[in-house]
Amino acid sequence: MDYIRTKVSGAKNRFIDDKFNLDLSYITPRLIAMAYPSCGLESIYRNHVDDVANFLSERHNSDFLIFNLSGKKYDNNKFFNKVNKIKYNFLNRFKNMNGLIIMPQH
């Protein structure tokens, strides 16, 4: 799976360490940007929702807020119900905005 995800990402930044290979970028130490997490068939080429949840739990002790800018639905329980949905009509001028902003709280 990592091979496919890396090919799909192309020249984009990825977070890669011993446990994780995720399409996400730290903008600052307290601000992360990434595409929305997926499950099922989409997880072949996107970050799997369980991998993202594990990453946030391990790296940020479950101390974070998520702003869902994608309009996509997923299981918020995996993120301790710390997901804030931003109304899509607010983002109409940002038509390519299809992801998450994550703010670690420590």
Image (cartoon, rainbow, N blue to C red):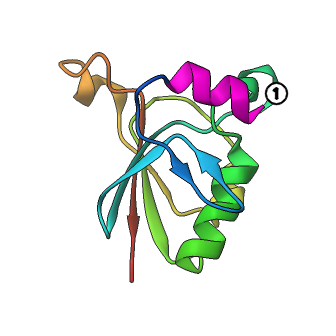
- Above/below status of 61 relative to 8: below
Q: Position of residue 80 (x, y in %)?
A: 64, 67
Kindly indicate the quadrant of the structure image that contains residue 28.
bottom left
What SS does tag 1 mark? helix
Q: Position of residue 34 (x, y in %)?
A: 45, 42
Q: Quick check: is 4 in the magenta stretch?
A: yes
The amino acid beneath tag 1 is Gly
Residue that carries the numbered disc 1 in the rendered image: 40
Kindly indicate the quadrant of the structure image that contains residue 62.
bottom right
Of residue 77 and residue 28, the one placed in the foreground of this image is: 28
| Residue at horizontal 18 percent and vertical 19 percent from the top | 93
> Which residue is the extreme one toward the left?
93
- Above/below status of 96 relative to 90: above
Magenta span: 1-9
Looking at the image, residue 90 sits to the left or right of residue 100; the answer is left
Of residue 14 and residue 61, the one placed in the foreground of this image is: 14
| Residue at horizontal 71 percent and vertical 52 percent from the top | 51
- Above/below status of 55 relative to 92: below
